[in-house]
Image (cartoon, rainbow, N blue to C red):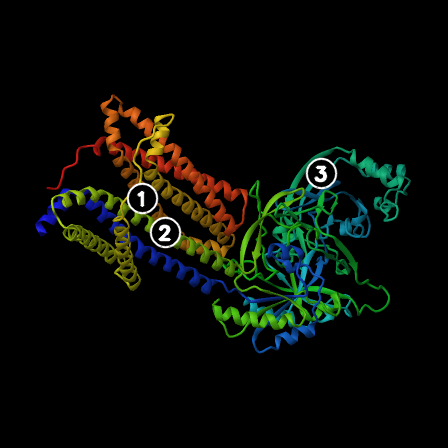
Amino acid sequence: MTSLYCQYIIRHKRAFFVTVLLLAVIFTLLPAAAQIWLRGHETVHADITDFARGKYDILVRPKNSPIEEKLGIVEENYLGVGDGGITLDTWQKIARDQRIEFAAPVASLGFFTKMNQSYQLPKPDGPTRYRVKYETTDGVHRYVIQEQTAYLLFPLAANLSDAFYPKELINVFGLWGRANFQLPPSYHPVIAIDPDAEEKLTGIDFSALKQELNGADFWPPEAHYIPLLDVKDSATPIDATITVENLDLSEEDVLSLKRKAGLKEEDPLFYAVNPNHESSDAYRFIEEQLANIPPTSKKTYQIHFSEFLSPFEQEWYMLDKDFHVVMESEYDFNKHGEIGRVSSYESQNTFFRASPPAYRLKDGGLSIRLVDTEGSIPVYRKLEEIRHQQFQSSGSNQDLHFFVQVGSVAAGQAYEQLAASPLGIYQFQYGVHQATGKKLQPTHHPGSFLPLPAHGLVSIRWAEYFKGAAPIDAIRIKVAGISGYTEEAAEKIREVARDLEEMGLYVDIIAGASRQDMAVDVEKIGTVIMPWTTLGAAESILSSWNVFSMVIAAVFGLSALLTLLSRFGVAEAETKEERGRLAMLGWSDSTIRAIFRFQWRIQLLTAAIISGGILAAAAGFDPISFAGFGTAILITSGLKAVTGKLHQRPSKRDHSFRPGRSLLTANLRFYKNHILAASLQLILTTSCTAFIFTVNHATTERIKKTRLGEYIHFHINEQQMLLFSGIILLTAFTLAESLYRLWQERKKQIQFLKIVGWQNREIRMLLLKEFVAWAGISTGFGAMISVFLAGSVLGFNSAAVLLQIGWAGAIFLGALFIFSIVLFGTLKYGLKGEQTWM
């Protein structure tokens, strides 16, 4: 009997080995898919645990912004401006909580400028005209801040020179017989911090802010001098173009000019420069006459002060004979000669408070509108100019407060991390201009659209002087006693957050936050890509991964189930005639069933051996693979038993031929049962794969919005693609099997068409038309199901619908390719007469 069984297997070796191959694929893919899914799950959770916790866990503020409420994100350096709202007592109460490791406050004091400093140019050889143009840039456009023209002519008594200049250079230009200029003021954010808490947060030493400065070292000595730390990554964003023109002008020419202007010959020309009479006839006449003198020679120099000057630079500086910047620390009298300069702290008597940029929600994105312009410089914030003090030439100045730079810290490179709790004041990566790729940078003006980091840091103890009784804008809190972003850690963080909310504060849980790049439409600039921070990114990544993993696991299992059902159905149909022949020869039903049970067991055993070998070689047969392998065999055996019972029922289908209007419609009606089976598989294939493709795309986009998500996606993308490839492989096998079975059922019709004179080309065209008819309807219906499913899970939007329609089209083209291969093989090899097994 065994030899008879083996003979039957040999005679039907194609069907036998197709089944073995499919079973081996299923037995290999299911355990591999389980392992891949589990590995991806572990990777996501491990990365979240390792990287999702940033520098701190909780952000406490008096309130949040409308943009945050709607988009769930905060801009980088969002703490660079603020109106306060939290008192020092409240901060100290929070810091004393035993559950809190540290509480680091932030108070934005406003935009301040450095002390006034003049800079000296090289001594000229004769009468000279100086044209100076100051510019700033936002990284995309350059803007002119100020243009000045000044003249240094002939020496006068008392170490002065005859000079002519605009009123802003009074008491600056021409002193000591030299050309001196002064940079326009540039305004920079000053932030108050607690040195100890901030050191715990950043690891940077801020102890210099605790020192007491001796007023005797400054003027006026009775004023308060506040230690300030400069942030090294900041700069004074001003460049100068200086044109030096030699003039052919004699002393007699100057005297004649004075007489014509109504000045005395002994009076210097700068007597016409009066703050109250700059537009006098004398001033305008002298200015016009000097401007009309052609230069005998000229040279132009570009001076990039931004490369040398910090926002609160204390050192004086000059330009040497080659017009190179020389700082005070580099000055050598023997090399650089005499230096004359003017300096004053009075420039700090005025500062600006700025609102956040004028954000607007636009088409689901952000835009920033222009608020004002200053000359050609765009202003994107509402500004309040505050003159908080005034020097008294007679009387006490003990209420004056001035910033003195006592050191510098480097803080701009420490926070490019996957999970970046937004420290709010240290981010110097401003973004890029989308169209040109140019890096953005702030101008010298406090109205820049960029969220600015701290340029100067002072101690929090000075905050009340500048902002009143509740100066703190935010407190950054790290919860004690936890490491990593586990569920237990998250619950402890939530507990502390709830208690803080009961104090009447607005609380954000920052643990698990991560950066993302966002397109912002800026008026007069264009679209820029700026770094923002997504709050709760870890939770979003976990939920997105959980949805996708469940969907892909379900679709993979369904694809495997459909493939097995299709193969078993085909196998039962292929053996139906053999069962009938054996019954006609007198074989009992029990003996016939024994033959096919033997064949099935051999197929199952062979496939198990092949699959087991592959799994053992690839993964060492770990417990997950072993469990998946055993589960796949049990499920397959159960499905085989169920399909065997179902196919034993007698068929009641009507096989009569009722011609329609054409052979195409007649064939579709006559073979509707076979076509229906293939159509259902194509509908399920299209709907499931289009749905999972859309979910995968949406999940990937959601995850990749943040830096943490990009990192996790990089690690799980290969695993996702392996699972998706497995689904496509099973789908292709199922469709090819169904089509092959359909053509086999129509073998007699095809042979008949050949007998009556049809060519292969005509037969292929007929079958192609039939296929396009039912396959097109099936893929379209599958796409509709996918759109509905995706819309229910992700929400309906045109982009997702177009994506699914495109994927359905790709499936149709793939099915058409499989159709062509199967049809070619059937016509060439599959229409030969069958051999009986006896």
Picture quadrant where residue 766 is located = top left
Q: Position of residue 716 (x, y in %)?
A: 40, 54
Q: In screen coordinates, is 42 left or right of 444?
A: left
Label located before the other in sequence (3 or 1) = 3
Identity, as a three-letter code, of the amino acid under mark 2 = Leu
Label located before the other in sequence (2 or 1) = 2
Residue at image mark 3: 245
Q: Identify which residue is drawn at 46% across, 56% down.
A: 547
The one of 666 and 740 positioned closer to us in this rendering: 666
- Residue 256 marker: none
Q: In screen coordinates, is 488 left or right of 346?
A: left
- Residue 558 marker: 2
Identity, as a three-letter code, of the amino acid under mark 1 = Thr
Q: Looking at the image, is 163 positioned above or below residue 50?
A: above
Q: Position of residue 374 (x, y in %)?
A: 75, 46
User: Can residue 207 be seen from the camera position used here?
Assistant: no
Q: Position of residue 31 (x, y in %)?
A: 30, 57
Residue at image mark 1: 734
In this figure, what is the number of numbered marks? 3
The one of 682 and 264 positioned closer to us in this rendering: 682
Q: Would you call the spot at circle 1 few (<14 residues within 10 Å), some (14-19), or many (20 or more)?
A: many
Label 3 residue SS: strand
